[in-house]
Amino acid sequence: MELSGLILLILLLLAIIALAVKNYPADVVFISVLTVIVVTGIVTPAEALVGFSNEGMLTVAALYVVATALKETGAVQFVINKILGRPQNKWKTQAKIISPVMVMSAFLNNTPIVATFIPALQEWARKYKVPSSKLLIPLSYAAILGGTCTLIGTSTNLIVNGLLISEQGISLNLFDPAYVGVPMAIAGFFYLLIFGNRLLPNKSVQSTFENTREYTIEMIVEPGSPLINTRIEDAGLRKLPGLFLVEIIREDTILAAVEPDEVLQSDDRLIFTGLVDSIVDLQSVNGLVPATNQVFKLDTPRRDRHLVEAVVSQTNPLNGRTIKEGQFRNRFGAVVLAVSRRGERIKKKVGDIILKTGDILLMETPRNFAERYKYSSDFLLVSTLTHTGTPNYEKSRTAWAILGGMILLVTLNVLSMFQASFLAAIIMIVTGCTRVEESRKGIDWQVLIVIAAALGIGNAMQVTGIASELAGGFIGLAGQHPYLALIAVYLITWGLTEMITNNAAAVLIFPFAISVAANLGADFMPYVMIIMFAASASFATPIGYQTNLMVYGAGGYEFKDFLKVGLPLNLIIAVIALLLVPVFWPF
């Protein structure tokens, strides 16, 4: 082993210690390793920085834009709410996530599926106070396991099949991997539900709001709303977390003690009382709008507004006057949605409430309101609650159509995933499903840096020959026994997958596996298939598979969380693959 290879191995070991033991930020660790590799001359800057022009990394960046558009239009949140509903047992909630994701990942690229689901699951978890750390690792693992069931489920399978065609002139059928992939997916499903839930970290969702301010707010079912002719319970307005539907005003009739079977009608006025964060969530319900018509008189579109809280000061010019007679909107350029006064329920329309010192106002404002009145004597403690406006539901169908078109173009091999994702991202912006500034905010730059740096380190392992040397030496330990050689091929492929990503590991080990089969006089197919499954078995670290990296930061995980949850799953998948592959593809 050359000195450069030895230095690289030591750096990798230090990186793993820094991530697993010290819990240093992944982007800092990987950029540091990449910097040392370049400075010491182990590889050239071009070889080290190859990951920053990698199509896979750039594809993930484009998919973040697509996911942002789906979030801004409320498209995915609607589906997630329909699938998950209200929280039940954790294992039931996880089952409702894992099942559809596995099925979808078998036929669609798993990266856009995970990118699409992450923001919606985060929003759902925040709303219902469910730890997102219990949801996002199962999301990634389900996508990986589902991808192993078909030839098109993951890029790794396609790459191995491409190598098989070029080297041996043989192509796999669409469902050939299912013989082993489906049992692996079933075993992974039950493992995640039974044992994974206990091993996953229970990191509480930090609420944006630190106290229990209560408001009473009046909402109206607007004409043409999808809620019309819908039961209260079916509309999801019954037993909302931290929120209570007090009554419905229908023309001149007041419906108190609202029953879950009550059917909503156009122009129904719904009176809610509850905690501030629940009131904020109410603003995003499709078909419900604040009952005050002042909201529609603000100059800025609703999607460009913030929800802001402010305390009425003693010197506020409207102190002792009603909101309506003081012409609050004209004076401050904002609309009061609700008023909190020492926990009391104020039984008046918002416009008729007489403001008093200490009242907390929940307002819909232009983006710059908090900055303008931060130091004003009119308000105390001005704070922005949300930095995004009401979802643009009118564009949700457009967003779904663009996503469907992207997937269709990739499935029919009209465009590559790289081309289709960038095309979809551009169309999302052009059609107004998202805006440039929101798209920039939606990209997780830390994840992209980690992916790019990891690819650079993996390339360095190949350029220095250390990866080939390790693979050849390890497989050589198996001697002349076909089954031991199969185990060796699996272990080294899996090990490299966790260090240098799945596709790189598969490409690197493929020629070794063919050579081993020829030397042993055995059929090459079991070795080819074992590479396919081992290269997708990336559960023990966040760096081996793109979907793991995507949920790493989003779920607030530590490196050791993947080891704790993923290592037992790795062992289960290894046992199934090593038992079944020789059955369907004999030596």
Image (cartoon, helix red, strand yellow):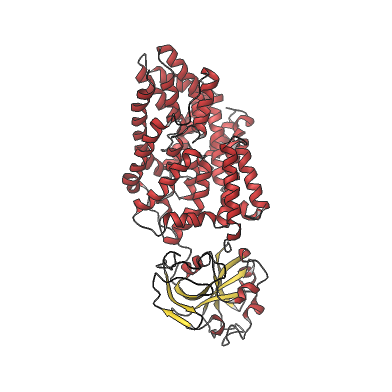
Is 395 above or below relative to 367? Answer: above
Where is residue 576 shown, x and y percent of the image? 34, 31
Counting the numbered discs, the total is: 0
Residue 263 located left or right of residue 571: right
For the point 45% across and 45% down, the residue is: 101
Q: Nearer the viewer, residue 139 or 406?
A: 406
* Screen quadrant of the C terminus: top left
Where is residue 94 shown, x and y percent of the image? 38, 50
For the point 51% across and 68% down, the residue is: 228
Residue 345 appears in the figure = no
Residue 197 located left or right of residue 28: left
Where is residue 351 shown, x and y percent of the image? 57, 82
Is 550 above or below relative to 172? Answer: below
Residue 207 appears in the figure = yes
Residue 240, quarter of picture: bottom left
Where is residue 383 shown, x and y percent of the image? 55, 69
Residue at far bottom of view = 320
Q: Nearer the viewer, residue 186 or 364?
A: 186
Q: Nearer the viewer, residue 258 or 284?
A: 258
Q: Nearer the viewer, residue 338 or 19?
A: 338
For the point 57% across and 46% down, the residue is: 404
Is 274 above or below relative to 525? Answer: below
